[in-house]
Amino acid sequence: MSARLLVAGVGNIFLADDAFGPEVIRALDERPLPSGATVRDFGIRGLDLAYTLLDGYDTAVLVDAAVRGHAPGTLSLVEPELPGAPAAGPPPEAHGMDPAKVLALAAHLGDEPLPRVLVLACEPERVPRGDEDITPGMSATVRAAVPKAVAALHTLVPALLADPTATPALRRPDESAAPSPAGVRPAGAGGAEDRQRTGTPVPPPPTARSSADV
């Protein structure tokens, strides 16, 4: 049986650079991925994504904007640690689209193991304040990263369909600067892509190390 792979765009199209994931999914309409990959825009429908993750996929690639301390527009490939057996009690919050909460909810809802999850993350430039409900318009930097993410997916997806355990490298011209504290743009950093593995899909601490892809 061939591998099943989900590519899921997540994010709020009304909150500036948080629209990155949905915009990448839209761009894939013009350059479709190989057969065997299911491509969907989940927006902020966390419960919908949680149930879909339980639908027998081998691998899921979430496309999202995430503050990781790189230069805006930087792409990172992150493999979060999947949650363990859920504790007794009410299910995790089902509203919104926090990837960590979605994974915890999926683990709570299903009896089967979750698929392997990778996050193709883009460092945002325009991050809305907590009191902003609508901040229309992506930054030019993050919009320019959309076709780069599409190209990256055309490298990642065939490799993952052939081997769901593979961790393909992102193509990039040079190594990104080491991550700085979350939300701080590294001095002199460029918009290169990088691949990192971390325990959770959240910004790494200042001491985290970046691995080079060639």
Image: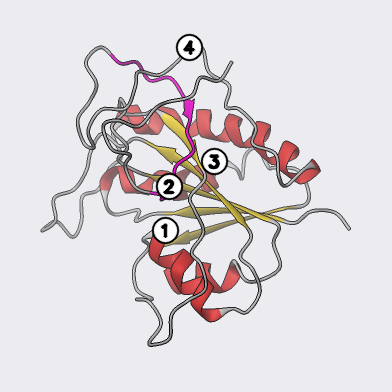
**Above or below, 46 relative to 198:** below
Please identify, in this view, whether the residue under mark 2 or under mark 1 is nearer the observer: 1
* Tag 1 secondary structure: helix
User: Contact, CB < 8 Å: mark 3 with mark 1?
Assistant: no
Amino acid type shown at disc 2: Asp
The boundaries of the magenta stretch are 189-201
Please state which of the two labelled residues, at mark 4 or mark 2, is closer to the viewer.
4
Q: Is residue 108 magenta?
A: no
Q: Which residue is mark 3?
A: 27
Q: Are the two marked residues, 4 and 1, in contact with CB atoms closer than 8 angstroms? A: no
| Badge 2: residue crowd in 10 Å (few <14, some 14–19, many ≥20) | many
> How far apart in space, not on screen, are marks 3 and 1 (Cα)?
22 Å
Identify residue for label 4.
Answer: 174
x then y, percent, for residue 98? 36, 60
Q: Secondary structure at mark 2?
A: strand
Q: Earlier in the sequence, mark 3 or mark 1?
A: 3
CB-based contact (under 8 Å), mark 2 and mark 1? yes
Q: Which residue is mark 2?
A: 64
Dominant SS in magenta: loop
The disc placed on residue 99 is 1
* Residue type, numbered disc 4: Asp
Q: CA distance from mark 4 to mark 1?
A: 28 Å
Residue 75 placement (x, y as % from top left): 44, 31
Q: Quadrant of residue 206?
A: top left
